[in-house]
Image (cartoon, rainbow, N blue to C red):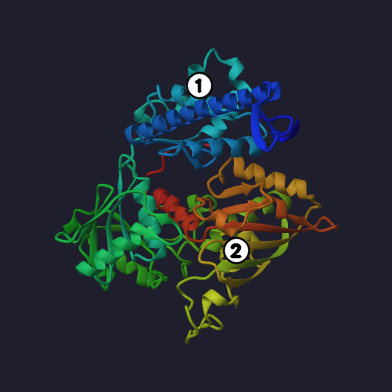
Amino acid sequence: MPVGGMGSAGRWVRAVSGNLLTFAPRKNNPQITIMKDTYEVKLKEWNEKEMAAVEISTIATRLWFDKSVELIIFRRQLVDARASEILNHHLYAQRFLNRPLTVEVTQLLVKALSQLDLAPARIDMGRLGVEWLNEGAQFASADAFVAAKLADFIGKEKLVLKPKDVVLYGFGRIGRIAARVIINEAGKGEQLRLRAIVTRSNSDEDILKRASLLRRDSIHGKFAGTIVEDLENKALIINGHTVYMIAADKPESIDYTTYGIDNALIIDNTGIARDREKLSKHLEAKGVSQVLLTAPGKGDIPNIVHGINHEKFDPATEKIFSAASCTTNAVVPILHVMDKNFGIHHGHLETVHSYTNDQNLLDNYHKKSRRGRSAPINMVITETGAASAAAKVLPELAGKFTGNAIRVPTPDVSLAIINLTLNKDVTIDEVNAVLREAASFGQLVEQIDYSISNEIVSSDCIGNSHAVIVDSPATIVSPDKKSVVLYCWYDNEFGYTKQVIRLSRYLAGVIRLRYY
């Protein structure tokens, strides 16, 4: 008689006959057959989606290298992306929008888009996909829809870019990330061209060590490409780009024209010189036309947060610029949106910031209070200039803010806690809706990301290209509906460097057409 088995869904039963344990087949269970068929169907559907994603990536990569057309989906890359990444981007879009923006929709539109003679552009397939879902029925085909939407982008004569030579002055955390970004986003080479890196020494040993640091990064991982040391010519060949390693102690002593470099933009990421007098030394060097500081500038140097106030300054007349700080770039877009929609009466900014090279690994002397204590094992209260810097970018907020900082034992990604008292009564839903809209459409989509996850932590934000990520489930509104607390993450290395490169493109005049 049966004494055991695999349950009602099992295919075999166990029986005892004397002292012998035997197994006998059970009749086919219809439930098992249905489950197996469902499994096979779902797997086949997934494989088809992967094939669609592969085709999207292939077309996107070809458009990038052939036409300098970059395809994204809500700021997430489709160029050279893995199929699983593209499918994950679509899942995010569906949850974010609560709309059926499937990989098949994007595949249809990308194939239609690839037939157009497009000028250099950056095109958000998320926006295009939503418009297709809303308006597609009004058009005879996807080809007709895409041609109508991108009519102003058709024709290479619509935008002709003149490449800009770039020199990185300094090669620390920001410098190395900037090198990665410029090289990986070079495409046809019609925008920024990394031509040289200036350090204090370019001995063979130094070049080998700096190449190794560029090749591998403890936080941001391996460089996506190849790096070959050309010691004879004092250069690195990075993904086919010849980048000269120049040794100099004084910026004015360099003749860049001897390296074939002219009219160059110098990105000074040393943080040593911050005023106009010292930064002007770069302009005395042969082959230099502009200087961009990757730190808050002093005196009358324009402090710029790209997306907010970059168009207020004319690169044809001003030659020295500052990209402000990572924290300023994170909080200013949020303050701009909140003030525009609700009015800010006053507020306080507290940044929980990862430790930096400015702190000590172990307890040692430091000219600033508390920063001499060991960074990896202490939380350290310190000052931040973000509140005053924000007022420089947004003068209407002058005198309304206080600010402070806490350095914490994490190597990257920081958190801005923004406490605001508003001029209007608000609800959590109203606040989050405004920030979500700003992150989805409009002029700040590159700056503001919007998270709907209840589980996000700092390491999830490493490599995020936005200046700031709004943690929407953490938003707090007081019972009187006047006070709001916003929690905003930012990759203080990568996200900030992306802002620096966006500003560099604007200064260089190599901004592509954009469809966001």
User: How many residues crowd mark 1 within 10 Å: few (<14), some (14–19), many (20+)?
Assistant: few
Q: Which mark is residue 156?
A: none
Q: Nearer the viewer, mark 2 or mark 1?
A: 1
Lower sequence index among marks 2 and 1: 1
State the image coordinates of residue 497 (x, y, percent, origin top left): 45, 57
Give the residue furthest to the left.
Answer: 232
Image height check: is 210 above or below 133? below
Kindly state the secondary structure of the residue where label 1 is placed: helix
Q: Name the residue beneath numbered marker 2.
A: 391
Image height check: is 144 above or below 43? above
Which quadrant of the structure image shows residue 422?
Answer: bottom right
Task: Answer with left or right where residue 79 lies relative to residue 183.
Answer: right
Q: What residue is at 64 percent from the left and 39 percent from the top?
A: 96
Q: 89 or 261: nearer the eye?
A: 89
State the image coordinates of residue 29 (x, y, percent, origin top left): 69, 23
Give the residue furthest to the bottom.
Answer: 365
Q: How far apart are marks 2 and 1 (CA)?
A: 42 Å
User: How many residues crowd mark 2 within 10 Å: few (<14), some (14–19), many (20+)?
Assistant: some
Q: What residue type is labelled 1?
A: Ala
Image height check: is 97 above or below 344? above
Q: Which mark is residue 148?
A: 1
Q: What residue type is labelled 2?
A: Ala
Kindly state the secondary structure of the residue where label 2 is placed: helix
Task: Answer with left or right where residue 278 lies relative to residue 285.
Answer: right
